[in-house]
Image (cartoon, rainbow, N blue to C red):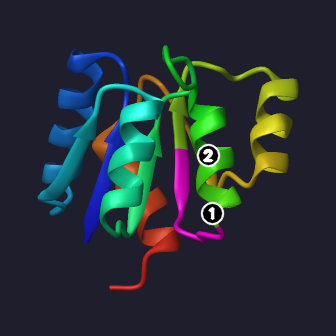
Amino acid sequence: MKVLVADDSGVMRKIIIRSLNAVGVTDVVEAADGQDGWTKFQAEPFDFVLTDWNMPEMTGLEFLKAIRGSGSTVPVIMVTTEGEKAKVIEAIQAGVTDYLCKPFEAEELRDKLDKYVVA
């Protein structure tokens, strides 16, 4: 499985990648923000996308909208501290697959991946 991780925090990207590695996902591409993620998403196929919400250049929501606007149905999980109901509804309306609130455990991430990816 190939996963794209978009987060403007290098530390958070490392935490997410470590969590992915802990559940057996080793083919991971990093993106420094939504715009970088969108560029990488267009360049190669991914099985899964994990994106932060609050990023410069292009937010996670804008990134999600670009992915869905391209016709892609790839699972996208918003990994964020944004937990207010209106934000969650906005992400759902934009086509987010699921939500993972920071901080999270590797097992929570594995459960999300297992839910949407057929091995």
Q: Secondary structure at mark 1?
A: loop
Whether residue 28 is visible to the viewer of this picture, yes or no, is yes
Label annotation for residue 70: 1
Q: Which mark is residue 18?
A: none
Q: Nearer the viewer, mark 2 or mark 1?
A: 1
- Of residue 43 and residue 5, the one placed in the foreground of this image is 43
Res 19 → quadrant:
top left
Image: 45 above or below 51? below
Q: Position of residue 49 (x, y in %)?
A: 43, 53
User: Quarter holding the C terminus?
Assistant: bottom left
- Residue 109 is situated, as x and y percent measured from the top left of the image, at 39, 49
Q: Residue at x 51, y 70 (%)?
A: 115
What residue is rendered at 36% in x and 34% in y? 36
Give yes or no for residue 75 being in the magenta stretch. yes
- Describe the element under mark 2 as helix, strand or loop: helix
| Residue 70 placement: quadrant | bottom right
Quarter holding the N terminus?
A: bottom left
How many angstroms separate mark 2 from mark 1 (CA)? 10 Å
From the top left corner, tell me how far across and down residue 54 is, in percent: 55, 17
Which one is in front, 48 or 34?
34
Q: Earlier in the sequence, mark 2 or mark 1?
A: 2
Q: Which residue is mark 2?
A: 64
Three-letter residue code for mark 2: Leu
Task: State whether residue 18 is above or below residue 80.
Answer: below
Q: Residue at x 21, y 17 (%)?
A: 11
Give above or below for 21 relative to 34: below
Give the side of residue 93 with respect to residue 109, left or right: right
Mark 1 is on which residue type? Ser
In the image, the segment drawn in magenta is: 71-77
Residue 20 is one of the magenta-drawn residues: no
Q: Tell me the chief SS of the magenta region.
A: loop
Q: Nearer the viewer, residue 108 or 50?
A: 50
